[in-house]
Amino acid sequence: MISVQRTTSQDSAPIVIVGGGVIGVCCAYALARRGAPVLVLERDEIGRGASFGNAGTVSPGHPPINGPGRWRELVRSMVDPLSPLYIPPRLTPGLARWLWAFARHCSPGHLEHCRRVSEPFARLSLSLHDDIAAEAPDNLGYTSDGYVEIYRTRTGKAVAAHEAEYARHQGFAPKSLEAGQLRDSDPALTDSILGGYHHEEGRTMDPFRFVEHVADLARQRGAQFRTGVTVTEVITRQKRAVGVKIGSGEDIDAGVVILATGAYSPNLYRKLGRPLPVQAAKGYHLDLDDSAGRTPAISRPYLLVERAVFCTPLPGRLRLAGTLEFSGVNHDIRRPRLEQLTRSAGQYLHGVAAAPVSSEWCGLRPCMPDGLPAVGPLPGWPGVFAATGHAMLGMTFGPATGEALAELILTGRSELPLTGLDPARFC
């Protein structure tokens, strides 16, 4: 059990949250709902980072990026630029250390550890997502029909079965579906599909609209937001956080600082002498415009197992999203990888090649080498809290992360077990 000295909502200085993505706004909402003064500082616009263009799925029970033998895939990916998981030839010291730590966590024992740590977060987040969606506008596109992992090969079937078993061990109940059942529901699926698993507990939404909505809920409860503001360092006094400095030179007082800075985390943590091993993993999306009726119509999201691509129906479009590319902190689009989304989806869905593209995007997911986020107090710095490293599960764990940190900061303890997410495990 992690406990800290509590911070009361009567403190004059606000709780400053650095980062306005899904994690930052969920923290803001949870704190503001409890009456705490909150100020969110975002370097761009709210929700314009990885939260903007992800697959829009809540995937409870989904395993982390670490898995037994996954390190072999990392090695193979270095020579295949179209691999779902790709590392360009740029082995920096930081990435080399991260890969070594990643490989050490690709074991059955660690996978079981991730399951135990993740389960309470996944269950709480599902309930919180439903509560948040109940107050949402129609354009959120929120559905609770789950998603289906579909496969075309024996190898894909084995992967899907393994992931279904992982979900079952968390108390969820994915159902096996035959190819005929799948095509009866969605005739756009090709004849090459052998079967799938329906993860009924999943949720779907427009991720950007979700972040906007949660930010609005936080504002309604008194939270303040400043955009276009880059935080350059945490100001400390007597080894305690007292504020932040921004790029213009302005100092902003803070009673507590939450660093929800995603893929941009390393710099601020390094300045505090606690360099969290966060690596940016680039993901891509293509949105196919369905206004002209030329885009495949599907009733629910599908995860294409062999290609690790999500096909998500969103209001007015079909989103193809996926890939993990460890190419550093940049937004350079590698067109062959972007176009691979269309080629991959075309193996599972009829009509993808002819569908008009309405959006091309890439974003950076923050990944920790053990596949678990860092959530909790930063060692040695009272008043500084980490909230980063959620990888592809930011939408899934965002609401629970906000609840856990709000409880911890305001009461000194959290009902959710945070020991497995303690930043101290790496710094």
Image (cartoon, rainbow, N blue to C red):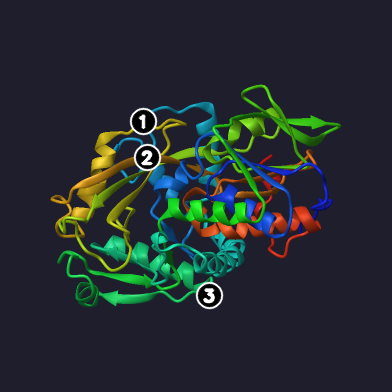
Which mark is nearer the camera, 3 or 2?
2
Quadrant, the C terminus: top right
Q: Across the whole image, how many numbered discs are drawn on residues? A: 3
- Which label is found at residue 171? 3
Mark 2 lies on residue: 362
- Residue at 78% from the left image edge and 38% from the top image edge: 381
Q: Is residue 128 left or right of residue 184?
A: right
Amino acid type, mark 1 = Asp
Q: Secondary structure at mark 1?
A: loop
Q: Is residue 292 left or right of residue 217?
A: left
Q: Secondary structure at mark 3?
A: loop
Question: From where the camera sits, is residue 372 visible?
Answer: no
Q: CA distance from mark 1 to mark 3?
A: 40 Å
The earlier-in-sequence mark between 1 and 2 is 1
Quadrant, the N terminus: bottom right
- Which label is found at residue 332? 1
- Which label is found at residue 89? none
Amino acid type, mark 3 = Gly
Q: Secondary structure at mark 2?
A: strand
Circles 1 and 2, Cβ within 8 Å, touching? The answer is yes
> Pointer 1: residues within 10 angstroms few (<14), some, or many (20+)?
few
